[in-house]
Amino acid sequence: MEPRPIEELRSEVVDQIAAGEVVERPAHLVKELVENALDADAKDIEVEFDEGGRRVRVSDDGTGIRPSDLKRALQRHATSKISVADDLWRLSSFGFRGEALASIAAVSRIELVSRPKAESVAHRVSAEFGTIKAIEPSAGNLGTSVHIESLFENVPARLKFMKSEMAETAQVKAVLKATALSRPDVGFRLKTKGRVDLQFPVASGFLARAKSVLGVKLYETEGEFEGLKVEAVFSGPEDVLGNGKGLWFFVQGRWIQDRSLQAAVVEAYRGLLMHGEYPIAAVKITVPDGEVDVNISPTKSAVKFRDPSRAFRAVSRTLRSALELAPWMQDGTRGAAMASGAVPAMRDVNAVSAGVVSAVSQYSSQYSAGSTVRGEARSVSEFTRPYRAKTDEPSSVSSERPDVETSRSAAGDSFFAQTAESSPVAEVHKGKWSSLKVIGQAGLTYLVCEDGDKLIFVDQHAAHERVAYERLMRAWREGGIEAQALLIPLVIELEPESLEALLSQAQDLAKMGFAIEAMGPRSLAISSFPALLKESAVKSGLEELAVRTLERGGSFVVEEKIGDVFARMACHSVVRAGQPLGLEQMRSLLEQMDEFPLSSFCPHGRPVSVEYPYARLERDFGRTV
């Protein structure tokens, strides 16, 4: 066969190809027009949306377009945002491609009316499916109005791909919410079918705007990490969704989609959310010029960081630092003990931590064979060494409640005594938990407490689990984890980059009980490892740690790994459901909870307590209507 000739595409074909990339659906069209308005310094933007997006009008009070530039605005690769290639690395505008209006004009009927301050009257230009008409005077306010009709009428195939009117409207609302989050200094309105559907007046700041857009209780934080500035508003662990749609990210003010940043937020909430739960948060990242490439997607919905792991660490650490203060615990009149400075005094932190680790090690053997608690099979993690308990006292099961373990092993009692008796509370202002009035125990599982006008039920296992977990983590951070030395070092083979990643974390691994050194370009020698781990788990654990370090970087990856182990250990090492407690033990547990701001959730994200207002009881008993 003869080769086919190479021909230059006709302009209308080129325009439709570009339109297919830039204007995939009406929401993309709205995004481009709203961003153009922001680039024109608009302070008030109104979007009118109808017919599922086939008819759109975006009006603003920005600087406008000069009459001589109106035609050029509808031509491809015509822009006022950049002039040379280097401008792409120091953008201060949303737009830069110079093809949005031209792409829209290629697949719709468009009318552009604009009036700069220097002009006494407005001027208009229109186009029908790529054919631009003459400029003429028109009525119009200061700023610019873009009116679009018959979207995709000349591209029937694209028209078929449009979703329902409700679905397209929902996407437009998401675009406007995102833009409003990024610019609290601008007012936004969305009208659908002639009525105001969304309205966001100018707000005093990021937090105020986020509260009006996201509609939940939010907290604010900011931080700087290796030159990256992070501002974030975030929900407490009680306000969650079943997907990541409540997470919003902005880089240089630009709304983007980024799975790595989403993972960074979820990682920051580690130990506060149950599986499948996602928080609500909006995160702004500002990076130095040249650290991010925004020119990688026609819709400009993604960016490329020069160092993605640095962005991950910046977001995760900034949020985690704020979450560890548990600001949702400070909303009440008393607040948490940590927040008020009323932290229970410790005689010897290291001694207590060592006791915690020792008791956990003893107690873990009670479950190494797999026992049953409330019908769930319990087994020690594959990473946990099955220590033999010092007691051979068998467990017993209540005949009245066969599904609940009621025995208290000597190791378990010892652990509770250590964590209770080794932590005397100083005579200071009580925190949230120790201020509760203990009434008793329900179902041998829940502490029944009173707090003013409500009853509070505290899950004794979840509460003690958080205390044990936090003390194990503290022991690790302070180097209190017992290490097992090897007469002959264990040598594992790794890829060079994995080896380098682990060596970069040697200091943090030493706190965990690992002593490592390079034996060659691919060999890692391990002369000691944590006594809490099985030798068979060391290789797989370090390999996984290397992968996560390469992906995310930073010492918090080590903390994440050991945190997973400690969470499972704490679960098997504390007061159980079905275990009777005395009043003093209950009060002691509540006092210990005040040591840690995150004590309102267990390490697996389950809530520690639930509240029942007396007003609800009075309604249930018919005392009030």
Image (cartoon, rainbow, N blue to C red):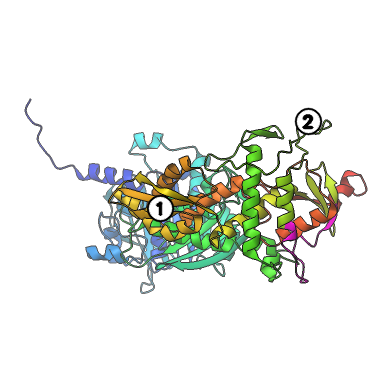
Mark 1 or 2: the one toward you: 2
Quadrant of residue 25 within the rendered picture: top left
- 59 within the magenta span: no
Q: Which residues are magenta?
A: 420-439
Q: Is residue 445 rendered to the left or right of residue 95? A: right
Which residue corresponds to mark 2? 402
Residue at 59% from the left image edge and 60% from the top image edge: 474
Numbered disc 1: secondary structure? helix
> From where the camera sits, is residue 515 visible?
yes
In x, y percent, where is residue 84?
Answer: 22, 65
Q: Is residue 81 rendered to the left or right of residue 378? A: left
In x, y percent, where is residue 301?
Answer: 39, 52
> From where the camera sits, is residue 147 visible?
no
Residue at 71% from the left image edge and 70% from the top image edge: 342
User: Mark 1: which amino acid?
Assistant: Thr
**Chain-order first, disc 1 or disc 2:** 2
Which residue corresponds to mark 1? 549
Quadrant of residue 211 within the rendered picture: bottom right
Quadrant of residue 501 within the rendered picture: bottom left
- 430 within the magenta span: yes
- Residue 290's disc number: none
